[in-house]
Image (tube, grey):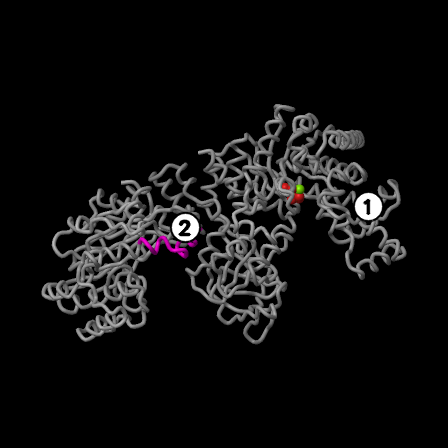
Amino acid sequence: MSAEVYGGRAKCLQRLIRLDMPVPLTVALSFDTVRDIAQGRMPDIGAIMAPFGFAPLLSVRPSSLDPDWGGPGAILNIGMTQERHDALAATAGLRAATSLYLRFIQCYAVQVARLDPEPFDLPDEPTSEALRSMLAAYEAETDEPFPQDPALQLAEVLRSMARTWDGTTARLLRQAKGAPADAGLGLVVQAMALGVGRGESGSGVIQFVDGETGEPRIIGRYLGQSQGREALRDKRDAIPIICDDGGPCLERVAPFAVRELLEHGGRGRERLREEMQIEFTLESGRLRILDAVRVPRGARAAVRIAVALAQDGVIPREEAVLRVDPGALSTLLHRQVDPEAPRDRIVSGIAASPGAASGRIVLTAVDAQASAARDEPCILVRRETTPEDIRGMHAAVAVVTVRGGITSHAAVIGRGLGLPCVVGASDLEIDRRRRVVIAPGGRVFAEGDVITVDGTTGDVLAGEAPTIPAALDEAFRTLLGWADEFRDMGVRANADTPQDARLAHDFAAEGIGLCRTEHMFFEGERIGMMREMIFAEGAAARRAVLDRLLPMQRDDFAALFRIMAGKPVCIRLFDPPLHEFLPSDRQGLRDLAEGLSRPLSDVEARVEALREYNPMLGLRGVRLGITVPEIYEMQARAIFEAAVLAGQDGEPVVPEVMIPLVSARREVELVKARVDAVASAVRAESGLPFTYRLGVMVETPRAALRAAEIAQHAAFLSFGTNDLTQMTYGLSRDDAGRFLGTYVEQQVFEEDPFHTLDLDGVGELLQIGAERGREGRPDITLSICGEHAGTRRAIEFCRRQGFDYVSCSPYRVPAARLSAAQSAI
Ligand code: PEP
Ligand code: MG
């Protein structure tokens, strides 16, 4: 029996039976059978029921390929009729018989006949009167008596479960969890173990690890006279499995059953090679195992469980590495709100997904996408989220909802994406018309105001709260250590600041693959100098200002070299258009005129002269390097002097210098000649014979096409897939967020190509660029450094093309290490 045909639950039950566990008789229906049922072709019900003998009571459970894809709820006690009730009353007692019949009518009415649940609430006492009244309610709602033919009952149950799986809501929910559009559902028909009746009867659930931490621990609940998972829902009378505080516990009530459960649990772990949660029933003292599912687990537990299984020799290390979803690692890496810092709490809700993030309030998914396109972190605040909000959630750094619980859409998706998430913040009011949110005490926060979401505690805080880095445990380090043994592709980090570099180092990045230098010119007094430089007349005057920036840049680079302690550091020369450094509003222009002691009209004229209709395709990157060469010369000098300095008191440094936005070989030749000249000068001045590597960013389609000739002047090519995507599609990376949602909805694009690497188009350019680059220079180093670089998809693709490494943001380094290992295994 394969899971691809019958689903995971059916497969698992078959294995439990083979392990000699006391599983009641089970019949599995395949995906194809269930598809037929949904389309009105009912199989022979008599044949399905035949193995169960005379007047059986049955349950039906869903069995999809991946249990995380959900499915219709289980339906128990099928076959309960008046006749069966009377017979059961004689053996198990009237109370038990009535209780089972009531449960079945309720479940059938709500889940199969889809009646309003209210008239079918279970009574406190299962009396004959309650039964009469529930049967009457059923008849009143449907104009038909409650069905008394078990075969008809089963047929209706199968039909309703098959149709539920086909419904739009179920489809959207499972697709959000990665299910393919044609995912199938199997159904498992099983003889009931009653859990209600004479002797010790009841049901419970047990597992042997903690689902949050993954620590070994026996956890579970048992509820006498109950069925299914009632023990988990009942807070009042359910008892723990293991005695810990002197209160009632199953160990005391039925010690033999607990011994048996522990034995089955241990065997199950070893033979099913997984930590399982076991659903069991005691039927007049007899243990029955009804079902076992993978212990539902958070990311921390997923890592710890996989590592422990491998350390115990249950699974090989490769499999442990394959078992952890790289995307889920981000939850472990997330920063937390500093517990020592003061908290300005706006409102509290349910802590649905851990971690902390600050950003501007947005109230719609579309605004979230627009904000992400501007590189502005945002927090999506919604009454509740629906599948249409998924793209907005992708774009947000955190999510807050007014409604919903721990399994609401926002919570489930938030955890899946590793987004800090607070749900059920019911004291928060959203006024869509005024575009504000109103917190308790009448505090009003407008769209655009910064808040912090603490998904670990459930608090929403005003402003940007101080945060601390995540604590990474031993299991995490062990797993990534194994991943490093299996992978054959390097992982570096994109790091601009000493803080980024430290993170990169802590996450074991093998170097810095992209240091964007422009942010360094926005800091403190530097922005003023940059503006002075932009206004300077002629090369000499520009050089004079740049000479004042030189020592600052040198310190920046020396700090990075020291932190990376001999690992490669790749510094990209200046990239953005100059106008980004100039003020755009009138007051800013006036301040600038004052600072430069120039007439306002002069300043305005210069700003106007620098204005471009299409700045991202304008005077930036290497084009600035060619037309205003003094900037690159200063940066090259700062890099080499810093390498000399850092090399003197630490590991020797071989800096990598990278030219952005290249589209022609001659651009590289010109810049290379100047950078070489600076290197020679610094060698002569310092007396130290350092070396360096010069590389080119492949960000324009032309650079990819002409990679063979460009490679002749470059030691490495680094593909910047952000710009390459922008230019391949002719799609502005800053503005496209506004309409990409519609494009994806209407299936023009399968996904937002700025999030998900377009393997067909951009991928072809990567392939061509890599092949031609190698043609031009066989030993060329190839890498990718756009936002896509940390994703499993891009890593797999680049590995196939023979790339040497990927470079992604520091927080994505662990996931990239794991992805690289998974694609190599
Ligand atoms: C890129 O374009 O992919 C890149 C890494 O550079 P930036 O994002 O700084 O343009
Ligand atoms: Mg770029």
Q: Disc 2 or 1, which lies upstream in sequence? A: 2
User: On the rendered structure, is 206 left or right of 819?
Assistant: left
Tag 2's secondary structure? helix
Q: Which secondary structure dominates the residues rendered in magenta?
A: helix
Kindly indicate the quadrant of the structure image that contains residue 19. Answer: top left
Percent of width and height locating residue 453: 54, 61
Q: Are marks 2 and 1 in contact (CB under 8 Å)?
A: no
Percent of width and height locating residue 520: 72, 47
Residue that numbered label 1 is attached to: 548
Quadrant into which the N terminus falls = top left
Label 1 Cα neighbours within 10 Å, binned few <14 / some 14-19 / many ≥20: few
Please determine whether, in this image, residue 25 is positioned above or below residue 347. above
Query: Which quadrant does ligand 2 occupy?
Result: top right
Residue that numbered label 2 is attached to: 301
Q: Say which residue appears at 63% left-offset and 35% top-offset.
A: 718
Percent of width and height locating residue 109: 27, 65
Residue type at the position of mark 2: Ala
Label 2 Cα neighbours within 10 Å, binned few <14 / some 14-19 / many ≥20: many
Does 613 appear in magenta? Answer: no
Nearer to us in this view, 168 or 553: 168
